[in-house]
Image: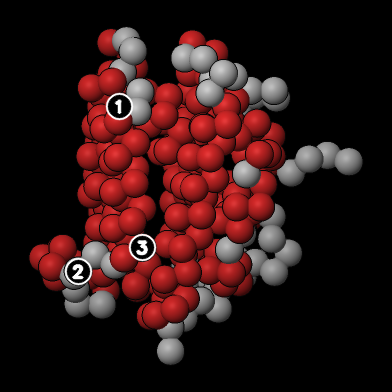
Amino acid sequence: MVAPRWETDFGAEGGLFRRLRAASADAWSGYTWHPFVRRLSDGTLPLPAFRTYLIQDYLFLIHFARAKAFAVVKGESLAAMREKAAAVLAILDETKLHLKYCAEWGLSEQDVVATPESAETVSYTRWVLDRGLFGDILDLEVALAPCTVGYGEVALRILADPARRADANPYQSWIDTYAAEEYQAMARAAAARIDALGVSHGGEARFARLAADFAEAARLEQRFWQQGLDAAP
């Protein structure tokens, strides 16, 4: 039986990323195939749920870019620093998709930024920033990877979903963004970086702590999806 792409595309067999994913299987599956994701796939997600998610995700990305900037500071080489600097710019570009949707609802960037951060946004972003402040580059990258790689996996799961609404899905442009090869390549690179740092920065000796952080990030992602569903009438 051939394993699905989302199990083989990210990270090397036996590498740190796949080991972390396996150790956090329940939390990871609960994140990457959350009911919010399944309703994106079949097009039944209520628009208020998506709107709440999208606004909070915009606010999240502002802090996520700041956390990525820590990786420039903590980068172990000039090449790594350049790569992370480019990643910060990629995240800032990602916010443009959010603003495109928000504009359709008559919301400007100023309106979105003025929206209070939810408890889910605060808890997730401050946790990631904390790992960036007090951990080394491997701690930080493990905290960041579930977001980057997870969205790549979410897109692959949706594409393989028998219940997917392929025609006239109101969320197709969102799906296309994360299914695109450009994003998939970025997700694969993030998983490969975890594998490489696992070798260079003692991942084996630190596995228990890293696995706990990886699972916590997946749980925080679950709660981030859930806040959207909770906002639906």
Looking at numbered disc 2 in the image, what kind of residue is underneath it?
Pro
Q: Would you name the residue on which mark 3 appears?
A: 120
State the image coordinates of residue 5 (x, y, percent, origin top left): 69, 41
State the image coordinates of residue 173 (x, y, percent, origin top left): 44, 60
| Left/right of residue 42 with respect to residue 85 in the rendered view | right
Cβ atoms at labels 3 and 1 below 8 Å apart: no
As displayed, is residue 188 above or below residue 62? above
Q: Which of marks 2 and 1 precedes in the sequence?
A: 1
User: Crowdedness of circle 3 by 10 Å Cα count: few (<14), some, many (20+)?
Assistant: some
Which residue is painted at 65% across and 31% down in the image? 19
As displayed, is residue 116 above or below residue 141? below
Looking at numbered disc 1 in the image, what kind of residue is underneath it?
Ala
Q: Nearer the viewer, residue 77 or 97?
A: 77
The alpha-carbon separation of the residues under discs 3 and 2 comes to 11 Å
State the image coordinates of residue 7 (x, y, percent, origin top left): 69, 39
Looking at numbered disc 3 in the image, what kind of residue is underneath it?
Glu
Question: Residue 116 shows which numbered tag?
Answer: 2
Q: Nearer the viewer, residue 26 or 168?
A: 26
| Left/right of residue 110 with respect to residue 151 in the rendered view | left
Query: Where is the N terminus found, in terms of image quarters?
Result: top right
Q: Which of marks 1 and 3 precedes in the sequence?
A: 1
User: Crowdedness of circle 1 by 10 Å Cα count: few (<14), some, many (20+)?
Assistant: many
Q: Would you name the residue on which mark 1 appears?
A: 71
As displayed, is residue 21 above or below residue 157? above
